[in-house]
Image (spheres, rainbow, N blue to C red):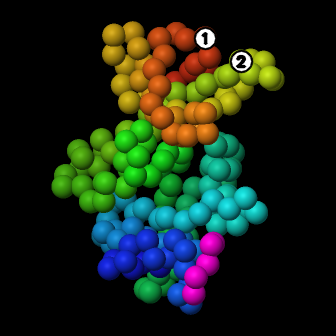
C-alpha cells in the first residue's frame, strides 16, 4: 500500500481503510517501485508473529541463505527484491541510521556508499546471565572508528536505539564484519 498524501495512513488502517491496530505494510511516500534504489516498507512487528516478526529471523545467516529475496504484490504484479542488508534501528530518531532518507542515488558511488553503510556491523558477546559463550548476542552498526574508540548505533540497547562507544579491543566485542550478502 502507499498513500503519498497521508503517508502514515496504513500504519493504523486495514487494506479496506478501516481502523486497525495491525495496520497493513506500506511503502514510504517518496519511493517508487521499479525506480527507487531503496524501498522502505513500514509496518508493525507484532508479538503474535504476524506482520514483520519474521524479519528478525534474518539475524541467522542460514535463514538469509534460504530467503535472499522477498516478494510482494504491486499494481503491476509481483515484485521480487534482493535483500542486501538487514539491521535493527529506530525510524525517525537521531540515534538510528536514517536509511529511509536514501531513495535514489544520483550516481553509482552514492549507491555503493549507502550499501556499505548498511553492512558495517559490530558483533557483541555480552557477559550476561548466560556468560560469554562465544556466540553473538547483539549486533550494532559501526558509525566510525576514531582515536581508538568504536562508535556504534545499537537497535536494542536498554530497550531503545542509541549511540554507544567502546574502546577498540573491548572484551565484549566479539568481532566486526561486513556480511557477505
Q: Position of residue 14 (x, y in %)?
A: 58, 82
Q: Looking at the image, do the residues carrying marks 2 and 1 touch, with CB atoms under 8 Å apart?
A: yes
In the image, which residues are magenta? 18-22
- Give the residue at mark 1: 171
For marks 2 and 1, give the CA distance: 9 Å
- Is residue 116 rendered to the left or right of residue 72? left
Pointer 2 residue: 127
Main SS of residues in magenta: loop
Q: Secondary structure at mark 2?
A: loop
Q: Residue at x 65, y 50 (%)?
A: 56
Q: Is residue 135 above or below residue 92?
A: above
Q: Let me know if residue 19 is in the magenta part.
A: yes
Q: Residues within 10 Å of mark 2 (few under 14, many from 20)?
A: few
Residue 134 within the segment the image draws in magenta: no
Disc 1 on helix, strand or loop?
loop
- Can residue 79 be seen here? no
Amino acid at each position: 500500500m502507499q498513500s503519498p498524501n497521508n503517508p502514515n495512513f496504513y500504519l493504523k488502517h486495514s487494506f479496506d481503510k478501516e481502523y486497525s491496530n495491525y495496520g497493513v505494510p506500506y511503502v514510504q511516500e517518496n519511493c517508487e517501485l521499479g525506480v527507487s534504489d531503496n524501498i522502505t516498507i513500514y509496518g508493525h512487528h507484532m508479538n503474535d508473529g504476524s506482520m514483520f516478526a519474521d524479519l528478525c529471523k534474518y539475524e541467522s545467516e542460514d535463514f538469509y541463505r534460504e530467503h535472499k529475496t522477498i516478494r510482494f504484490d504491486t499494481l503491476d504484479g509481483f515484485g521480487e527484491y534482493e535483500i542486501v542488508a538487514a539491521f535493527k534501528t529506530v525510524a525517525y530518531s537521531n540515534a538510528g541510521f536514517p536509511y529511509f532518507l536514501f531513495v535514489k542515488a544520483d550516481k553509482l558511488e552514492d549507491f555503493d556508499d549507502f550499501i556499505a553503510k548498511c553492512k558495517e556491523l559490530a558483533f557483541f558477546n555480552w557477559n550476561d546471565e548466560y556468560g560469554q559463550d562465544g556466540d553473538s548476542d547483539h549486533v550494532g552498526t559501526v558509525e566510525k572508528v576514531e582515536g581508538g574508540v568504536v562508535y556504534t548505533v545499537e537497535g536494542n540497547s536498554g530497550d531503545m536505539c542509541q549511540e554507544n562507544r567502546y574502546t577498540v579491543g573491548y572484551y565484549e566485542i566479539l568481532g566486526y564484519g561486513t556480511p557477505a550478502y
